[in-house]
Structure formats: structure tokens, C-alpha cells
């Protein structure tokens, strides 16, 4: 009885240890249709997997395992190989799970091409092309999920090269049409507002403040207010005039005095060609 009790206690402690160690992916691996116990102890080379496997789940794991080799003493040739591999995957992987994995991997890259690849991933989110050149479309909600993931990654990365893109997404007007389409655009705008919290930059501050001035959607307005506080380090009430004074930003009525009115903000065109990811 004592040995049985001790075994039960050990089993419980092992379960608690696995949980505390962050093994959230453990059961995902166990329940995968191609799971083998040996994969718990010897992970395959991600480059081999990406070269040989067409399974989206396996490719996603391999892409998440990739690291920017310049940060770990790799050669310039190694760096070029990895950057080209991940930036290409972010815009061309056939499954959404692998596409998102490539986007997540790029979040940790310091190479300036990573930022351009994340922007390209936003515009390439609608689908992919087969080897024969046929265009395959993702469902709208899946494409929007990829776009939101690219926006989150840009916010985490924090590169100044992403500010204009994030501001463009934030400033787009509400979508027309079905409720689901309007909500997807709103979700993307909220994600862009959250990402801009990383940028203490006048362009980001002005865009966030403009949302506070003009937006009717409470969720987006609140997100812009929270991001403005984070970006500037200032704790002011949600009063646009107070923020204009604190940030020394012009009031919109005086900003265009004696000048032509700015062009109206247009809906972001997700179909436009993606920026090149390689120099």
C-alpha cells in the first residue's frame, strides 16, 4: 500500500512538473496523427522537414524551430539561407498554420528584411499559388487571421519601418457590406492600434489620437487610448484636447489652415502586390 501510494504521489508530481514547465504543446504533439514517441526525444532537423514534408503541421513546427543564425554565430551564408527560407514561407506556405508559424518566427528576427516580409505577409494573406500558377483562396476569416498575426508580429518586433504600414491599417475606414466583413476590418484596426503601443513616434501618436477624436467604435477607441498611454508613458484622461496639448500636436482644424485638405483615407487593398522580401 505504501509503495502504491508513493507511486501515485510521484505520478502526480510528474504531472504537475510537466504542467509548470509550459508543456502546453505536449498533448498537441501526442494527438497529432503522425505522432511517434521518439519525437519527444529527438526532434528532426527543421531544414530536412521543410525540404521533404508537405504536411502543414510538421512544416509549422519546423518553421517555429528556425532561428536567425547571425544571432548565434552562424555564417553570412547560413543567415541568407534562413532569412530567405522564412521570408518566403511567410508569403507562400499553402496552409495557414504553416504561414502563421513563419510569421511568428520572423518576430524574433533582427534582419531588416523580416519587417518587409511581415508587411508582405499581410498583403499575401488571401491565399497562395500552386506550382502550376493557379490561385487558391483562403476563406475570409482565415485570411483575416493571417493579417492580424502579421500586425501583431510587427508590434512585437518594433521596427520603425513598420510604422507607416500600421498607421495605414489603423486609418482605413469601416468596411461596408456584411457584418462579418465589417467585424474583420475592425478587428484588424484594433490589432494595428495595439501594435502601435510599441512606437513612441509622432506618426503613431497622431494616428492613435485621431482615432480617439473621431472613432465611434468603443473597443477601437479604448484600444487607441491605451496604446497612446503605453507609447508615450503619459497618464492622461481620454480627452483628445489634453493629449494635443501634452504632445504638442496641432488641432485638426488648425493643422490644415492655409493648405489643401488631405486626401481621404482609403480602404486597405489586400490584393495589391506584396513588397519584395529580398534585396
Image: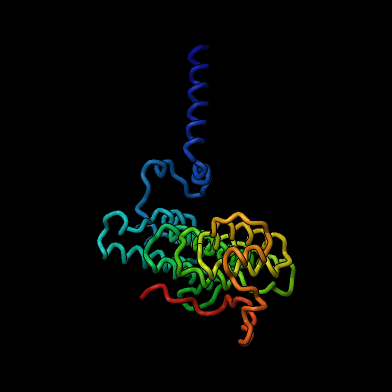
**Which of the two residues, 263 or 270, is positioned nearer the viewer here?**
263
Asked if residue 46 lies left or right of residue 99, the reply is left
Above or below, 164 against 21 in this view is: below
Q: Toward which corner of the image does residue 207 lie, by quadrant? A: bottom right
**Which of the two residues, 60 or 247, is positioned nearer the viewer here?**
247
Instruction: Say which residue appears at 67% left-offset and 74% top-offset.
Output: 173
Asked if residue 242 lies left or right of residue 44, the reply is right
**Which of the two residues, 36 or 176, is positioned nearer the viewer here?**
176
Give residue 129's position: percent from left, percent from top. 50, 74
Instruction: Say which residue appears at 68% left-offset and 59% top-offset.
Output: 238
Instruction: Say which residue appears at 70% left-offset and 68% top-offset.
Output: 215
Inspect this view and state whether residue 188 appears.
no
Give residue 171's position: percent from left, percent from top. 62, 72
| Quadrant including the C terminus | bottom left
Instruction: Say which residue appears at 65% left-offset and 81% top-offset.
Output: 264
As drawn, the residue found furthest toward the left would be 75
**Which of the two residues, 58 or 194, is positioned nearer the viewer here?**
194
Amino acid at each position: 500500500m505504501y509503495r502504491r501510494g508513493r507511486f501515485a504521489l510521484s505520478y502526480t508530481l510528474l504531472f504537475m512538473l510537466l504542467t509548470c514547465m509550459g508543456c502546453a504543446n505536449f498533448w498537441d504533439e501526442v494527438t497529432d496523427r503522425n505522432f511517434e514517441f521518439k519525437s519527444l526525444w529527438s526532434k528532426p532537423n527543421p531544414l530536412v522537414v521543410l525540404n521533404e514534408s508537405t504536411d502543414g503541421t510538421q512544416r509549422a513546427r519546423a518553421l517555429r524551430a528556425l532561428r536567425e543564425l547571425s544571432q548565434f554565430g552562424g555564417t553570412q551564408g547560413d543567415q541568407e539561407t534562413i532569412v530567405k527560407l522564412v521570408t518566403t514561407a511567410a508569403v507562400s506556405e499553402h496552409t495557414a498554420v504553416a504561414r502563421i508559424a513563419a510569421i511568428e518566427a520572423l518576430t524574433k528576427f533582427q534582419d531588416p528584411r523580416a519587417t518587409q516580409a511581415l508587411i508582405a505577409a499581410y498583403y499575401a494573406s488571401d491565399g497562395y499559388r500552386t506550382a502550376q500558377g493557379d490561385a487558391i483562396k483562403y476563406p475570409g476569416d482565415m485570411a483575416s487571421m493571417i493579417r492580424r498575426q502579421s500586425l501583431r508580429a510587427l508590434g512585437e518586433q518594433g521596427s520603425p519601418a513598420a510604422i507607416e504600414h500600421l498607421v495605414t491599417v489603423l486609418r482605413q475606414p469601416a468596411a461596408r457590406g456584411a457584418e462579418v466583413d465589417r467585424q474583420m476590418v475592425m478587428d484588424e484596426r484594433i490589432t494595428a492600434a495595439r501594435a502601435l503601443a510599441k512606437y513612441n513616434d509622432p506618426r503613431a501618436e497622431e494616428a492613435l489620437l485621431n482615432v480617439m477624436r473621431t472613432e465611434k467604435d468603443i473597443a477601437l477607441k479604448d484600444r487607441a487610448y491605451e496604446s497612446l498611454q503605453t507609447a508615450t508613458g503619459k497618464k492622461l484622461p481620454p480627452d483628445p484636447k489634453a493629449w494635443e496639448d501634452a504632445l504638442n500636436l496641432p488641432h485638426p482644424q488648425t493643422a490644415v489652415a492655409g493648405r489643401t485638405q488631405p486626401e481621404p483615407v482609403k480602404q486597405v487593398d489586400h490584393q495589391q502586390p506584396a513588397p519584395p522580401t529580398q534585396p
